[in-house]
Amino acid sequence: MSKWKQLSQACRDEKVFGRFLGIFFILFGLFFVVIGVTIIPIFGFIVAIPLLLLGFYYFKKSPGEDDVCEIDTDRNR
């Protein structure tokens, strides 16, 4: 059985929400990079860097990092 099928619905929702949040922060960070290049150089880059880091953190975070979402493999034995 695949790992995705073994995850509970709450863990799947958490993973999907994390991906959406990551994409939001990445797009918002890229927006500030464009502002930093064109309009307000220092402010744009100061805001863009933390937003991009947050975006990549939430996009890469998996439900397996939480204790609640760990798959119990001994249960099927």
Image: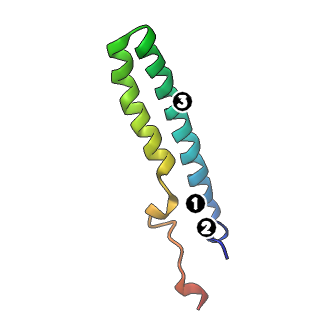
> In the image, what residue occupies the spot 40% across and 26% down?
48
- Callout 2 crowding tier (Cα within 10 Å): few <14, some 14–19, many ≥20: some
Query: Are the residues at dot 3 and dot 2 in contact (C-beta closer than 8 Å)?
Result: no
Measure how far apart labels 1 and 2 are at the Cα level: 6 Å
In the rendered structure, are the residues bearing label 1 and label 2 in contact, judged by CB atoms less than 8 Å apart? Answer: yes
Q: Residue furthest front?
A: 37
Q: Amino acid at mark 2?
A: Leu
Q: Nearer the viewer, mark 3 or mark 2?
A: 3
Image mark for residue 11: 1
Mark 2, residue position:
7
Residue 5, quarter of picture:
bottom right
Residue 57 in the image: x percent, y percent?
Answer: 43, 45
Q: Residue furthest top?
A: 39
Q: CA distance from mark 1 to mark 3?
A: 24 Å
Of the image marks 1 and 3, the number of the one nearer the N terminus: 1
Q: Is residue 70 above or below residue 9?
A: below
Per the image, label 1 sits on a secondary structure element best described as helix
Q: CA distance from mark 3 to mark 2?
A: 28 Å
**In the rendered view of the protein, which quadrant contains the N terminus?**
bottom right
Amino acid type, callout 3: Leu
Above-or-below relation of 54 to 30: below
Estimate how packed mark 3 is, as few (under 14), some (14 to 19) or many (20 or more) residues with alpha carbons within 10 Å: some
Q: Secondary structure at mark 3?
A: helix
Q: Secondary structure at mark 2?
A: loop
- In the image, residue 64 lies at what x, y percent? 49, 64
Does 60 sit left or right of 53 as displayed? Answer: right
